[in-house]
Amino acid sequence: MQLAQRLSNITEPQTIKMAKLSRELKAKGVNIVDLSLGEPDFRTPDHINEAAIKAINEGYSKYPPVAGFAELLEAISIKLKRDNNLNYPASQIIVSSGAKQSIYNAVTSIVDPGDEVIIPTPFWVTYATQVEMAGGIVKYVHCGIEDDFKITPECLEAAITRKTKLFMFSSPCNPTGSVYSRAELAGLAEVFKRHPYVNILSDEIYEYINFSGGHESIAQFEELKDQVMVVNGMAKGFAMTGWRIGYMAGPRDVVQACEKLQAQTTSGANSIAQRASITALLSDLAPTYKMVAAYKERRDYVIGELQQIPGVKANLPHGAFYAFPDISSFFGKTDGETVINNDTDLSMYLLNTGHVSTVCGTAFGNPNCIRLSFATSMANLTEATERMRKALGQLK
């Protein structure tokens, strides 16, 4: 069978690939500390689980509306006003099977073949692939560790052309943990106001995992109201990765386009998960903040340990649960058997020699770095950093 040409450039995400390699080694009896996947190690809070059980007992087993239950759309509207001071009525919100589908719906609804999409690097692995699937042209803007991996207004202005259709970014950021302040977003907003034809997709899935204070959304700037799409979901802040509930808020015409697209693909998201999400959004957030406190403790430990390893350069992430250290000083070095030519070599060396699973930075658009998730126990992180210290110390 001859497959569609559009699949020829789609590869397996490195995050999933490294997790798969870790599982294979574990199956062979190798003790691997897996820092490759960005998944909370906490259980979903009990009150959310109980809401799901209640929904099952009440018979919520039928097809839900394509855009989501009215009660969930209203809960999201309340949450956006309560937490972000954003005014989005239910008619400007759509629920999907995870934030990844929300992003796919938005990209597919907006981007035509030949349109340019600006993505500052580093970026989440799926952004570029989804743009390419829609026929768009990705225009990367490099953001280095010296800029805390954040795009500046000057770099944004220089990247925009008359072909620019969309700008995609996340804050807090996966993979860097960088968080844009209100002042930094205001600087970008001034640029976008001069280019009203540029749409903005703001991925805010890590909103609650923020160590620097209140979350700031670029959607807060009224002048950009018709340009911004806010994507969020239940996975990270509520430890609900497997529940597969994401949502998008934005201009009504874009939301309607996404609903039309979704009606022909997945239809409505899981009905039980939607009912549980209503409870999650409208209930006490104490369990979420407890998880965030644990992530902050882990962050402080991991960054402190990485900064003590000679040759590793690590900035302080202010959100999410990732470290994204620069490891380029090891390029060209060897332990006598393996030569480290690039980030992929180093990531594989840490897996096979140090038995620590990471993800190469190339997957996120920065070949000088690797990504480590600290969404795991302190015991695992203590073991992982010690193994890394030992393995990297063997490279000369």
Image (cartoon, rainbow, N blue to C red):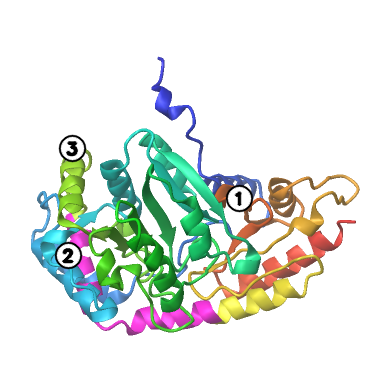
Left or right, 355 with respect to 19, comes to right
How packed mark 2 is, by other alpha carbons closer than 10 Å (few <14, some 14-19, many 20 or more), is: many
- Quadrant containing the N terminus is top left
Could you say which disc has been placed on residue 197 in the image? Answer: none
Q: Earlier in the sequence, mark 2 or mark 1?
A: 1
Tell me the residue at 37%/71% (across/down). Answer: 237
Which residue in the structure is indicated by mark 3? 264
Stretch of the chain drawn in magenta: 271-296
> Residue 372, how many percent across, how many down?
60, 62
How far apart marks 3 and 2 lie (CA) works out to 23 Å
Please identify the residue farthest to the top as the structure is shown.
Answer: 1
Reply above or below: 19 against 389.
above
Which residue in the structure is indicated by mark 2? 275
Is 264 contained in the magenta span? no
Determine the image quadrant of residue 215: bottom left
Residue type indicated by callout 3: Gln
Reply above or below: 183 against 387.
below
How packed mark 3 is, by other alpha carbons closer than 10 Å (few <14, some 14-19, many 20 or more), is: few
